[in-house]
Amino acid sequence: MSNAREHQAWRGGIRHRPAGGGKAAYVHTLNASGPAAGGLVPAILERHRREDGTVALSDVLRRWGLPEVLGAA
């Protein structure tokens, strides 16, 4: 389990105010539960899709062992 502490909440503007009042504070997030995590794959597919249906992957993603191009479905 990874604890991103308040970094992801800060980026997403996610705060919590205690029930008794007081100053709002950023929440802590776990395991990439920040707002951008769920939209990562759709964003890559939409941004890099070619007219023939294939998806060109960036050098950064290929460094992690992914292919240069994902085939059409």
Image (cartoon, rainbow, N blue to C red):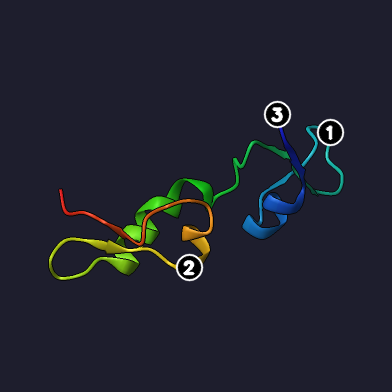
Quadrant hosting residue 2: top right
Residue topped by disc 1: 20
- Rate crowding at label 1 as few (under 14), some (14 to 19) or many (20 or more) other CA atoms within 10 Å: few
* x and y, in percent, of residue 24 in the image: 80, 48
Q: Nearer the viewer, residue 47 or 57?
A: 57
Assign the N terminus to one quadrant of the image.
top right
Quadrant hosting residue 20: top right
Relative side of 43 to 20, left or right: left
Relative side of 31 to 69, left or right: right
Residue topped by disc 2: 59
Quadrant hosting residue 51: bottom left
C-alpha span from label 1 to label 2: 50 Å
* x and y, in percent, of residue 60 in the image: 52, 64
Which mark is nearer the camera, 1 or 3?
Answer: 3
Marking on residue 1:
3
* x and y, in percent, of residue 46 in the image: 30, 63
Relative side of 5 to 29, left or right: right
What kind of residue is marked 2? Asp
C-alpha span from label 1 to label 3: 30 Å
What kind of residue is marked 3? Met
User: Measuring 38% from the left and 63% from the top, which residue is drawn there?
Assistant: 57
